[in-house]
């Protein structure tokens, strides 16, 4: 696997990698494979039609991880990738994904991807996904990730998704179907600036008895950027669901939040929350009395909000 300095920096930003990771991994660079490794318990297989990969995790696999980052460092590359994850019963694994785009040219660079998770009975998965963009070209940096989640009885999935820099346009879609006693926890962190646009859409079908879902989005919109957050948590059985959107607006930015809950069973317990506002003046004043400039105080508040 040979990668240049730009690609290695993207890899560090989206997956925290400074060297080849231990365990299973599949690294994709500029639309092609840049390296792959499997283990006795985790197999990675290319789809026959060339559209993506299947990640197959054996039942009972514990304390292993999978890295599947994507980096694009050439202007004008656009791709659509389908990846399927099959997590066996009683497995407990961490999956680290992410996509980074460096565009110094005039052409559009774009990555669209669909990740479908089949979480087996009593399996546990932590999925970490980060999106990042840089480069001083006039061409756009666009990402449209779609995550499809199916959690079997007693399964557990924790999803952390982050986009805090450099993506001009993104349409982020997450759908999930939960079986009996299944659990889904989603934490989204998002920041836009300039004239960027970000749309997030969650649709959660809580079909199983005593299943639960907790979806929290924290976002910051700066300058003239725009954000739209929508969510629909459907309680179709005795279950517990919660969706929340907290946003800070700065400059001339615009944020719209449309959280929705739908109780289709008398024993469904659902909550939705949304809060949008500017940084409180007293917060700035307090930090400035400690010696920070106004800009430093704003940065400190923003960093704390997105932790």
Image (cartoon, rainbow, N blue to C red):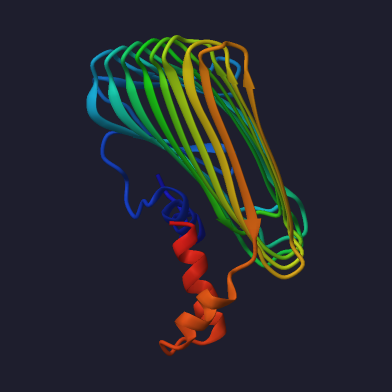
Residue lying at 77% horizontally and 67% vertically, measured from the top left: 252
Find residue 85 and report its horizontal and vertical position in percent: 45, 21
The N terminus lies in which quarter of the figure?
top left
Q: Nearer the viewer, residue 168 or 274?
A: 274
88 lies left or right of 106 = left
- Residue 124 visible? The answer is yes
174 lies left or right of 106 = left
Residue lying at 47% horizontally and 72% vertically, measured from the top left: 300
Q: Nearer the viewer, residue 90 or 245?
A: 245
Find residue 199 and report its horizontal and vertical position in percent: 70, 43
Find residue 164 and report its horizontal and vertical position in percent: 56, 57
88 lies left or right of 196 = left
Residue lying at 57% horizontally and 11% vertically, measured from the top left: 265
Residue lying at 49% horizontally and 60% vertically, measured from the top left: 305
Q: Nearer the viewer, residue 262 or 251?
A: 262
287 lies left or right of 91 = right
Find residue 215 and report its horizontal and vertical position in percent: 51, 35
- Residue 191 visible? The answer is no
Q: How many marks?
A: 0
Q: Quadrant of residue 172?
A: top right
Q: Is residue 71 above or below residue 67?
A: below
The C terminus lies in which quarter of the figure?
bottom left
Q: Is residue 29 above or below residue 138?
A: above
């Amino acid at each position: 696997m040979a990668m240049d300095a730009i690609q290695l920096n993207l890899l560090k930003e989206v997956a925290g990698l400074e060297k080849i990771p231990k365990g299973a991994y599949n690294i994709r660079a500029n639309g092609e494979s840049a390296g792959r490794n499997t283990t006795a318990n985790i197999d990675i297989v290319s789809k026959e039609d060339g559209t993506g990969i299947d990640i197959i995790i054996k039942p009972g696999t514990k304390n292993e991880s999978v890295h599947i980052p994507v980096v694009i460092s050439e202007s004008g590359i656009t791709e659509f990738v389908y990846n399927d994850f099959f997590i066996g019963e009683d497995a407990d694994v961490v999956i680290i994904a992410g996509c980074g785009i460096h565009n110094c040219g005039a052409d559009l660079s774009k990555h669209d991807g669909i990740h479908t998770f089949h979480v087996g009975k009593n399996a546990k998965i932590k999925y970490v996904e980060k999106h990042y963009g840089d480069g001083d070209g006039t061409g756009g940096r666009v990402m449209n990730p779609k995550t499809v989640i199916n959690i079997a009885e007693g399964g557990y999935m924790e999803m952390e998704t982050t986009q805090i820099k450099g993506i001009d346009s993104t349409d982020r879609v997450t759908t999930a179907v939960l079986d009996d006693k299944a659990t889904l926890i989603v934490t989204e962190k998002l920041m836009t600036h300039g004239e960027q646009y970000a749309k997030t859409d969650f649709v959660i079908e809580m079909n199983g008895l005593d299943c639960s879902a907790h979806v929290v989005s924290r976002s910051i919109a700066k300058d003239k950027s725009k954000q739209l957050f929508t969510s629909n948590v459907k309680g179709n059985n005795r279950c517990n669901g919660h969706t929340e959107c907290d946003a800070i607006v700065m400059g001339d930015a615009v944020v719209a939040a449309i959280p929705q809950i739908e109780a289709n069973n008398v024993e469904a317990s659902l909550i939705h929350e949304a809060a949008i506002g500017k940084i409180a003046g007293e917060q700035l004043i307090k930090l400035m009395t400690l010696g920070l400039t106004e800009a430093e105080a704003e940065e400190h508040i923003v960093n704390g909000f997105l932790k």
